[in-house]
Image (cartoon, rainbow, N blue to C red):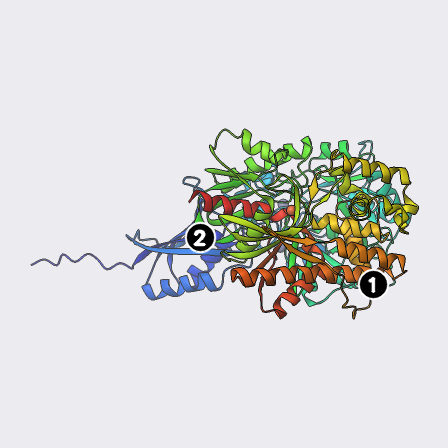
Amino acid sequence: MQNCRPPLTDPAQIIAINGIVQGVGFRPFVFRLAERYKLRGRVANNHSGVYIHIEGPMDKIDAFVDDISSLSPPLAQIDGIKRSAVVSRDFKTFEITKSDSAGKRATLISPDIAACDDCVLDIRSADNRRYRYPFTNCTNCGPRYTIVEDLPYDRSNTSMRAFTMCPACDNEYNHVYDRRFHAQPNACAQCGPRVSLYDHQGLLVKTETSLQAAVKLLKQGCIVAVKGIGGFHLAANAELDDTILRLRQLKNRPDKPFAVMSKTLVHIQQYANFRPLEKKGLLSRQRPIMLLLKKKPFPLSALIAPGNKFIGCMLPYTPLHDLLFDESLKTLVMTSGNLSGEPIAVGNEEAFGALAHIAEYFLIHDRNIVTRNDDSVVLVTAGKNRLIRRSRGYVPAPIYLKNQIPPILACGPEQKNTVCLTKQNLAFLSQHLGNVNNLKTYAVYKETVMHLQRVLGIEPEVIAYDTHPDYLTSAYALENTDVSRKIAIQHHHAHVVSCMVENQVEGPVIGVALDGTGYGSDGAVWGGEVMIAQYDGFERIGHLDYVAMPGSGVAVKEPWRMAASWLWKIYGENLFDLNLPLFDSLPAKKIELLGEMIKKKINSPLTSSMGRLFDSVAAIVGIRFKASFEGQAAVELESTAQNAASDINDLYDYGLEYKSLYTILIEPMIRAIVQDVTDGVGINVICAKFHNTIIHLVVDLCDSIRKTHGLNRVVLSGGVFQNRILLQGLLRQLEICSFQTYSHTLVPTNDGGISLGQAVIAASLVK
Ligand code: ZN
Ligand code: ZN
Ligand code: FE
């Protein structure tokens, strides 16, 4: 009888890997691993990530797969590995094959990553062919999200398409053992993007070295618009008062702090304090702006962050930024290149149009920025990094959900907007889009939604939006004709749920939402809310006592209005007998007129906002009557409290009144503050006592709810929790009282996190 056994072949398997595995050096890593184990087959990118056809002895394949997860490249993030047996194709070698553009897109795009140490070394070494080349990058670093037009992540789908690699770059790109193997933005001075310097009239400055010329101009005190990775910055020498003052005047930004960039950590150390966690943040590959405590004396211009104990600092995150410094220029103000309230400029023409009246010079380059992306901002409070603005370096990495949810588009709120798109157990928050209350930002908003849907391959089945009837973002949701299922979501419910989601907590919980403005279910302006929250609903259980908000939106810009509103409510006509700084700074007539407005209910909605309570107190004690940026009074109130001695534990009286829900009575506190001001108690002390009071009244209310509802978990959300004293103090007090607490770290506690909450609430409502 003939032997009909097939010839012996090695087993073969397909290994499919998803996560952030493209554009991060994954295929060469797989290649090297296969060579090490003497396995055969091929590796390629596809729309769901990376797939490998592997052939060889099974024990070696097992070891190979183990190594894939444990040794993957620094920027890679593996979310899943699936193995299946296939028929051997008798490969003789292992190879890397071209991308396959068919199939559904499920792969993840890497965020933009700061220049790695190797690349920085390249640009600083005089004998390196990339010496001083501002667009140096490799597989471990460089632009990603901001240059991607479509998937898969190949050079032809990025704005690097315009540049053809020179033979030397091409060689690196095709050499599997090279650090630049398949680095899509690979470039050098011969073949890649170039910088050039223009004056504000658009005339080219003839110079051999645009960068060195720009450094010289900065040193002399010029304002230079610099095109970076996600948009333009306005750069200015941080030591020159005149320059910073001019920048403030021209940008029409009297007080709002500017961020600075310093050449190295050593330079930051000269003007700011940082603890180990903050140092780690500064050096992280995301390179956010870290909010650090200023040193005293402060050697940079006092005009950078007036009235603020903190300064936003970052380190250079591209070679171009690294080259903006030299031996005598160490720190630059680097503020977003935009007009107040408008999106950051990205195009060269756009920048000249928007910034020519501010910047004397423009350092531009010829690589297109596909997606605008502002700098991210991180604050460390209570021993944790907390993202205040989640953008460059973080977006579009997903937030992981506990459960699978349908594809949803959440439109976000109006202020500090981000949108959120979901797919399976992933939630993708967009970059920071700012205040969507003008047509320019709205246009960028619409562009971003479409771009994100395309590159993430998400076709939403449900749209979630804020209940506020006047938001452009709500109008966008309602005008959308592609999706029929639309769900309106209350602002503070979305706040609380966004915090539950990032902490992977399910309800019911006690949700504490303290913020500036959100549309309430009763039509009032909410913002001091305590609720029993679950994903699919909430019950409002307590709030700050209502008070009129005369002038509505104007009251946000003019804290004196909120102060006067409380004083009218408590003292009536007798308010003019009080001895408060308010009356020295404002004509009695104005305060009288405001009283009329409130009485006649003209444009004076009721509010329970905690942000507005901060405004009231700031104006009563005389810290600030008019604000030039959002939250200014609250920031100054916090800074003032920080000046007080640390042993002030006193608090003011307040009341808790229960009818159908709890009302937190503020009147006793306002009366006591007025008395303290009259008695000449130091404002540092008053501000510290005010913070103590807010902490205690929240704990008090949570305690009452625990007794009636048996709930022990407290979730904190809302912009007011950017306040360090409050967040730290409240977490501590709640924990002393044996509550389990949850606060934000991954998404902003302010309105930048709202879209995540909206998406998850919508998902639970359609279930
Ligand atoms: Zn690199
Ligand atoms: Zn080249
Ligand atoms: Fe809010």
Badge 2 marks a residue whose secondary structure is: strand
For the point 69% across and 67% down, which residue is it?
A: 276
Q: Earlier in the sequence, mark 1 or mark 2?
A: 2
612 shown above or below 278: above
Q: Which mark is residue 685?
A: 1
User: Picture quarter containing residue 265?
Assistant: bottom right
Indicate the quadrant containing the C terminus: top left, top right, bottom left or bottom right. Answer: top left
Badge 1 marks a residue whose secondary structure is: helix
Q: Amino acid at mark 1?
A: Val
- Is 194 in front, or is 685? 685
743 shown above or below 537: below
Picture coordinates of residue 340, whole percent (x, y): 76, 38
Q: Can I make out residue 748 in this image?
A: no
Label 1 environment density (alpha carbons within 10 Å; few <14, some 14–19, many ≥20): many
Q: Which residue is mark 2?
A: 403
Q: Can I make out residue 252 in this image?
A: yes
**Ligand 2 placement by image quarter:** top right
Q: Amino acid at mark 2?
A: Asn
Picture coordinates of residue 395, whole percent (x, y): 59, 48
Front position among marks 1 and 2: 1
Picture coordinates of residue 543, whole percent (x, y): 64, 51
Distance (Cα) linking label 1 and label 2? 47 Å
> Is the distance from the Cβ of mark 1 to the nearest ligand 3 atom less than 8 Å?
no
Outermost residue to the left: 1
> Is the distance from the Cβ of mark 2 to the nearest ligand 3 atom less than 8 Å?
no
For the point 79% across and 35% down, which residue is it?
A: 597
Q: Is residue 433 left or right of residue 711?
A: right
Picture coordinates of residue 433, whole percent (x, y): 65, 41
Label 2 environment density (alpha carbons within 10 Å; few <14, some 14–19, many ≥20): few
Q: Is residue 335 left or right of residue 378?
A: right
